[in-house]
Image (spheres, helix red, strand yellow):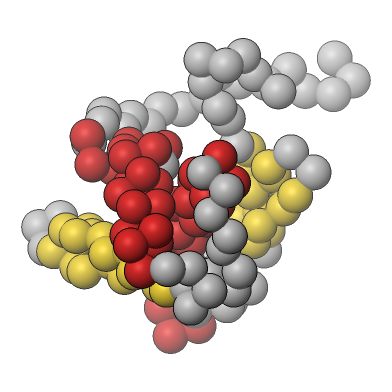
Amino acid sequence: MAGMDEMTVALAQSGQTASIASIRDYTIVIDRPSSHGGSDAGPMGGETLLAAVGGCFMSTLYAAAQARSIPVEGATCRVTGVFAANPRRFGTIRIEVACDSCPPADLGHLVEVAERGCLVAATLRQGMEVTASVAAPRAHAGQ
């Protein structure tokens, strides 16, 4: 794993339209549905982004609950990306949390703490430079 100053995920082509993301000991297949010219081998990148927002948010909320001894059981989360145009992107992402076992005031507090502490939400909220480049050629095996 890289140092604490960066995090890297590797992707490799799978078939004509899918990529496999390798993350520690896990893999996620990312593809397009057949209606968008893909082979529907996995969720789209945008769906994966929304899942990443929700997963980061909820793990931050659970950590906040544990630190405050607030019991959280059966919590759920819906993450909705609202499209904007030129370029097509998510203009807004809404996170809605429900938890019947948690007192409403406590849940509201935990949502505020998670909203501040979630790495993915904080990253998107700040905005950032995203660059793409051609990697340096790799040495071929057997040379």
Q: Quadrant of the C terminus?
A: top right
* Residue nearest the observer in this picture, 143 or 19: 19
- Regarding residue 27, the answer to whether it shows in the image is yes
Q: Quadrant of the N terminus?
A: top right
The extreme left residue here reads 86
Does residue 59 appear left or right of residue 108 in this picture? right
Does residue 131 appear left or right of residue 7 in this picture? left
* Residue nearest the observer in this picture, 129 or 75: 75
Does residue 102 appear left or right of residue 125 in this picture? right
- Regarding residue 32, the answer to whether it shows in the image is no
Does residue 23 appear left or right of residue 130 in this picture? right
Q: Residue at x 26, y 29 (%)?
A: 129
Q: Position of residue 27 (x, y in %)?
A: 72, 53
Compared to residue 11, the image places residue 52 above or below, namely: below
Residue 15, quarter of the rendered image: bottom right
Q: Residue at x 22, y 34 (%)?
A: 126
The extreme bottom residue here reads 35
Q: Residue at x 60, y 37 (%)?
A: 9
* Residue nearest the observer in this picture, 95 or 85: 95
Q: Residue at x 62, y 14 (%)?
A: 3
Q: Position of residue 77 (x, y in %)?
A: 44, 69
Q: Position of residue 6 (x, y in %)?
A: 52, 20
